[in-house]
């Protein structure tokens, strides 16, 4: 397989600096609404700050890939004497929890690093975080060529997993017939 | 489609358990914006002046501000309105934290409670699903503890919960409503919540909030964001550290407490200790604070970090903010900051106002030391200062023994003790209240015209939430004044710069003669307006009205309001709306008995008082506001503000007479 250069976008999360304000959630939800910023709903955000204030836990987590099945086991991390809830660091949209799902449709959400035309200098959550919790970094790596992921396909697959192929086809046909 | 607001209130009749989601009149946005503005309107419409605070008809309204839930920084105020058991006036304490936005996302601007539940309940608002749930298992639990227990019980860590503690359940007049790192403290909202048998209100929302022109809103907001960055990088020179930055006073961050501990009075607002802040104190306090505040934390959507997570040995973790770090220590004459971190946790769990309560406890100590309270009253009370305060706090929250007096605040306690014991000496110990409400612990020399008006006349009754944009004192050097006014975009008018340049530390261009009554009225009116805008929008005063050179100001608001709501408002329109709300609020309190003679700061706030100047200040200010000699809005003023229905009511009730206009 031929190698290509790929730009890897990274957000470094300095969770110790997070003051728990959730501005990142708000701007993310607004940016991804249509038209932009006309709808604000942090439940639609692709970044969520997992918060247990009295345990001194403020942990921004970005939405990663959709997964149809939950893990066989669970992890609990203890760091610096603080116990993090199971799956705290996991980015997956997963059947085990309601994180990173559209509140109405339950379709999976995924961080797209605020892909935009013209491109944003940095993802919006990074721009809005005035406490430097979220630091944007880009680097180039060489990788094998890969198929681009079709977001519509990911969404449809999650619906197939949830409702079954036949139900989904029937529904699509019915909607198409209604016009 | 409704913008910035949800367009729905939740109406809960606690007696019948009836819950309704009621669409609100879209016109109210145009006439009263939201938050305090629309809440005051509901109280005017629905609560007659004969209503007493503990009557079932007294409404308790929990409201989000118009901007809560939008991307506007620091728009996170949850505002409670109710007839205060302490003042018998319409109180409106507010708190930061995270609840207001959550309420908007759940689909409501306000929750309106009427009547009383037959037994202790809590309310669970989860989008469209709203339940009144049994809270008998939470009876007597702490206000902080309750929040955690409810989140656990609901299995919803993302719910935001406002709760009362034992003090609220016992209808203590200074009981607060606590939520996350914040507290709605002043005026006894906790007592009204307790009287209605509501232990807590839990909210979770995952619905959309709409903006009329989101992109435009963000563009306007960028100005605010840029200014926040600028101000964080450029603290104001020549003022106390605590006043140099933005946000609420950064009490959890700053360790230098020379100004607070030496400028404000200790005990029952009695005396200043001008040489308190020694090197030794500074070293021990600083070390303790840095070791105890585990993390600086914010409220919803705010880049500042005014709160702190407190990790103190032997005390379960809790959150603290602002002046409570000092109020109990200063009230008790305890020189050790350890005491603050211990007693605050207890006080927050009981759910009491950190401003009034320490003064009330100190009042009790004075009565004991002067032989009015007896050994029998203090039976079982430890003899050390710290132990005594803990013991008194406990009595107050439980209304046990003398605690039943103290629970009513210094004004009522002094009168009840005097009556019960036939000893009128007690009355003199209530020396620091205005309109029956404990005021800032001030002991200064010269009458200050601006503060005279702010203490005396505002409906909020809490000075820290009236003042802000104007420096607390003049600058000695002209060059510093010139430097200060050079960059002051927040001013509504350039003339204010000259006022500041002319203001001298002493002499005829200084207090009490200058600012003149006319200029003082202009400055106070401007600052009040800012607070009224904040309170309608739900913006933290720390980022706006209660702050020198803040990111939000009169020139920014109209653009943001227009983009958010789709209304086209300019500065005059916004001014008119908040003036309307202020005058409506004034009318409510006038009908509830506020008189000109009530509008006075405590007599001993300043050593040098000037009765003639004070009378002139009040008359000039009333005139400036469009009020008559008695402080009642005139018919003309009410007409200008489209409040003819208020004028009619004031006339009908004989408060406003034709010949006075």
Image (cartoon, coloured by chain):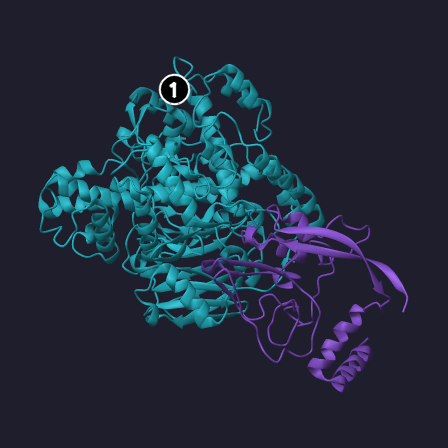
Chain colours: A purple, B cyan
* Figure quadrant of residue B510: top left
Residue in front for this viewpoint, B409 or B648:
B409
What residue does disc 1 label?
B511
* Figure quadrant of residue A154: bottom right
- Examine the rendered structure and indicate whether residue B278 appears above or below residue A25: above
Residue in front for this viewpoint, A87 or B23:
A87
Q: Is residue A77 left or right of residue A13?
A: left
Q: Is residue B547 left or right of residue B175?
A: right
- Examine the rendered structure and indicate whether residue B237 appears above or below residue B366: above
Q: Is residue B208 left or right of residue B403?
A: right
- Give x and y (percent) for residue A170: 78, 84
**Residue at the farthest right position:** A2
Mark 1 belongs to which subunit?
B
- Give x and y (percent) for residue B594: 32, 39
Residue at point 42%, 43% (across, down): B585
- Give x and y (percent) for residue B398: 24, 58
Residue at point 54%, 51% (across, down): A19
Dot 1 falls on a residue whose secondary structure is: loop
Q: Is residue B5 left or right of residue B434?
A: right
Residue in front for this viewpoint, B349 or A179:
B349
Looking at the rendered image, the quarter that the N terminus of chain A falls into is: bottom right
């Amino acid at each position: 397989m031929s190698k290509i250069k790929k730009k890897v976008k990274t957000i470094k999360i300095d969770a110790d600096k997070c003051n728990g304000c959730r501005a990142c959630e708000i701007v993310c939800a607004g940016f991804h609404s249509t038209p932009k910023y006309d709808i604000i709903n942090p439940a639609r955000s692709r970044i969520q700050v997992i918060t247990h204030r009295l345990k001194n836990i403020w942990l921004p987590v970005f939405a990663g890939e959709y997964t149809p099945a939950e893990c066989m086991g669970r992890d609990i991390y203890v760091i610096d004497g603080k116990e993090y809830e199971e799956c705290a660091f996991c980015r997956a949209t997963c059947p085990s929890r309601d994180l990173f799902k559209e509140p109405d449709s339950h379709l999976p959400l995924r961080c797209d690093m605020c892909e935009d035309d013209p491109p944003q200098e940095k993802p919006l959550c990074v721009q809005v975080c005035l406490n430097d919790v979220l630091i944007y970094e880009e680097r180039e790596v060489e990788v094998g060529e890969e198929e681009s992921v079709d977001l519509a396909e990911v969404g449809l697959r999650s619906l197939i997993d949830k409702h079954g192929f036949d139900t989904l086809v029937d529904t699509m046909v019915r909607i198409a017939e209604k016009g | 489609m409704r913008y910035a607001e949800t367009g729905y209130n939740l109406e809960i009749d606690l007696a019948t358990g009836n819950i309704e989601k009621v669409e609100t009149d879209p016109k109210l946005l145009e006439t009263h914006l939201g938050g305090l503005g629309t809440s005051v309107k509901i109280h005017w419409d629905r609560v007659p002046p004969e209503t007493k605070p503990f009557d079932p008809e007294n409404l308790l309204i929990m409201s989000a501000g118009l901007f809560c839930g939008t991307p506007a920084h620091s728009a996170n105020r949850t505002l409670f309105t109710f007839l205060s058991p302490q003042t018998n006036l319409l109180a409106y304490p507010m708190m930061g934290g995270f609840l207001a936005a959550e309420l908007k996302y759940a689909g409501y601007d306000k929750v309106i409670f009427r009547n009383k539940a037959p037994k202790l309940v809590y309310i669970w608002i989860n989008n469209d699903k709203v339940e009144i749930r049994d809270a008998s298992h939470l009876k007597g639990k702490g206000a902080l503890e309750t929040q955690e227990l409810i989140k656990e019980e609901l299995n919803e860590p993302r719910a935001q919960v406002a709760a009362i503690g034992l003090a609220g359940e016992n209808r203590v007049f200074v009981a607060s409503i606590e939520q996350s790192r914040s507290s709605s403290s002043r005026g006894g909202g906790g007592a009204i919540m307790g009287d209605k048998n509501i232990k807590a209100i839990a909210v979770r929302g995952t619905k959309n909030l709409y903006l009329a022109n989101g992109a435009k809103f963000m563009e306007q907001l960028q100005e605010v964001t840029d200014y926040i960055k600028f101000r964080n990088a450029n603290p104001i020179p020549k003022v106390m550290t605590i006043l140099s930055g933005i946000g609420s006073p950064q009490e959890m961050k700053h360790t230098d407490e020379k100004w607070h501990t030496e400028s404000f009075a200790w005990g029952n607002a009695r005396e200043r200790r001008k040489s308190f802040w020694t090197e030794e104190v500074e070293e021990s306090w600083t070390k303790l604070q840095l070791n105890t505040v585990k993390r600086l934390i914010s409220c919803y959507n705010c880049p500042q970090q005014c709160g702190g997570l407190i990790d103190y040995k032997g005390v379960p973790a809790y959150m603290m903010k602002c002046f409570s770090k000092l109020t109990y220590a200063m009230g008790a004459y305890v020189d050790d900051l350890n005491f603050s971190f211990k007693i605050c946790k207890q006080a927050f769990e009981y759910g009491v106002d950190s401003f009034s309560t320490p003064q009330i406890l100190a009042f009790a100590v004075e009565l004991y030391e002067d032989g009015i309270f007896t050994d029998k009253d203090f039976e079982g009370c430890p003899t050390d200062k710290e132990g005594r305060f803990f013991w008194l706090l406990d009595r107050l929250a439980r209304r046990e023994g003398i605690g039943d007096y103290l629970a009513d605040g210094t004004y009522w306690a002094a009168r009840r003790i005097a009556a019960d014991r036939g000893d009128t000496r007690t009355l003199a110990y209530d020396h620091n209240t205005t309109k029956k409400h404990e005021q800032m612990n001030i002991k200064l020399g010269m009458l200050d015209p601006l503060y005279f008006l702010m203490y005396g006349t505002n409906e909020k009754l809490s000075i820290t939430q009236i003042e802000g944009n104007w420096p607390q004192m003049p600058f000695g050097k002209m060059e510093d004044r010139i430097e200060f006014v050079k960059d002051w975009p927040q001013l509504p008018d350039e003339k204010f710069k000259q006022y500041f340049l002319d203001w001298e530390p002493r002499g005829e261009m200084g207090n009490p003669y200058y600012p003149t009554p006319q200029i003082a009225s202009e400055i106070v009116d401007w600052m009040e307006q800012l607070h009224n805008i904040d309170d309608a929008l739900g913006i933290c005063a720390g980022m706006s009205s209660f702050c020198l050179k803040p990111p939000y100001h009169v020139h920014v608001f109209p653009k943001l309001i227009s983009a958010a709501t789709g209304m086209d408002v300019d500065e005059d329109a916004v001014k008119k709306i908040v003036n309307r709300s202020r005058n409506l609020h004034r009318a409510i309190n006038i009908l509830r008995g506020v008189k000109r003679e009530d509008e006075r700061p405590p007599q001993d706030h300043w050593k040098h008082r000037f009765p003639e100047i004070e009378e002139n200040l009040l008359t000039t200010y009333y005139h400036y506001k469009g009020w008559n000699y008695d402080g009642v809005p005139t018919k003309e003023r009410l007409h200008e503000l489209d409040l003819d229905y208020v004028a009619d009511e004031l006339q009908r009730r004989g408060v406003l007479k034709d010949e006075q206009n």
